[in-house]
Image (cartoon, rainbow, N blue to C red):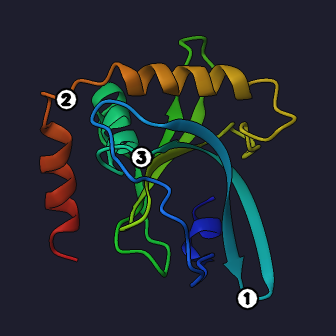
């Protein structure tokens, strides 16, 4: 799974409208189901992600996962990004014994800011696809996680910046 993100993810130099004229602390303007594109040579693969738009920090999904499940298992550095995608493996999201792989991501640009999450099962099936029976439950769960995060807890930031600092 790490290989798909390690290759170049898609970016385009297109004039964008300002998607976030205002950012919100502890809130977001929308929860979107978007495609995360990965380009590897001539091949392009897309994965589904839940995006929380116009948030105060693109690290919100990283922090929520860290606060709930501890330190991530892997960092994945897409070739065109400064900050890594963080991966948690074997996470029992619904406390029912089923394990998931969770990837958290985010983007902060002058015109846009979001925090996002991608979710896969143990066979690497994209559980946020339009045909997934779990898509709505996962979206609702992460919306709840996001809305109820503990802003006073700062442990994540210390661990994250110590990990990324030397790079």
Q: CA distance from mark 3 to mark 1?
A: 32 Å
Q: Mark 2 or mark 3, which is nearer the start of the sequence?
A: 3
Estimate the spatial distance between the alpha carbons at disc 3 and disc 2, rounded to whole Å: 17 Å
Cα separation between marks 2 and 1: 41 Å
Between residue 50 and residue 13, name the one nearer to us.
13
Above or below, 61 against 12 in this view is above
Left-right relation of 63 to 128: left
> What quarter of the picture does the C terminus occupy?
bottom left
Is 161 on the left or on the right of 148, as rendered? Answer: left
Res 86 seen here: no
Viewer-proximal residue among 9 and 125: 9
* Sequence-wise first label, 2 or 1: 1
Quick one: label 3 or label 1, which is nearer the N terminus? 1
Q: Give the residue at mark 3.
A: 54
Give the residue pinned by disc 1: 41
Q: Which residue is pictured at 60% across the width and 11% down the height?
A: 96
Asked if the residue under mark 2 is in contact with the one under mark 3, i.e. CB atoms within 8 Å, the reply is no
* Residue drawn 29% across the image and 45% down it: 56
Residue lying at the far right of the rendered structure: 131
Residue 151 is marked as 2
Query: Nearer the viewer's eye, disc 3 or disc 1?
Result: 3
Secondary structure, mark 1, is loop
Q: Secondary structure at mark 3?
A: loop
């Amino acid at each position: 799974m790490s290989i798909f993100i390690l290759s170049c993810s898609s970016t385009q130099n297109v004039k964008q409208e300002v998607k976030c004229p205002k950012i919100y602390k502890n809130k977001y303007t929308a929860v979107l189901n978007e495609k995360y594109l990965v380009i590897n040579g001539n091949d392009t693969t897309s994965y589904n992600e839940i995006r929380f738009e116009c948030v105060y920090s693109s690290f919100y999904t990283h922090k929520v996962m860290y606060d709930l499940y501890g330190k991530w298992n892997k960092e994945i550095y897409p070739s065109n990004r400064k900050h890594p995608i963080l991966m948690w493996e074997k996470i029992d999201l619904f406390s029912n014994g089923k394990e998931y792989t969770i990837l958290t991501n985010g983007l902060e640009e002058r015109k846009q800011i979001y925090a996002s999450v991608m979710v896969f099962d143990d066979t690497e099936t994209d559980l946020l696809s339009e045909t997934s029976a779990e898509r709505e439950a996962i979206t609702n769960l992460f919306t709840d996680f996001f809305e109820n995060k503990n802003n006073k807890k700062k442990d994540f930031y210390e661990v994250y910046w110590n990990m990324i600092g030397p790079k």
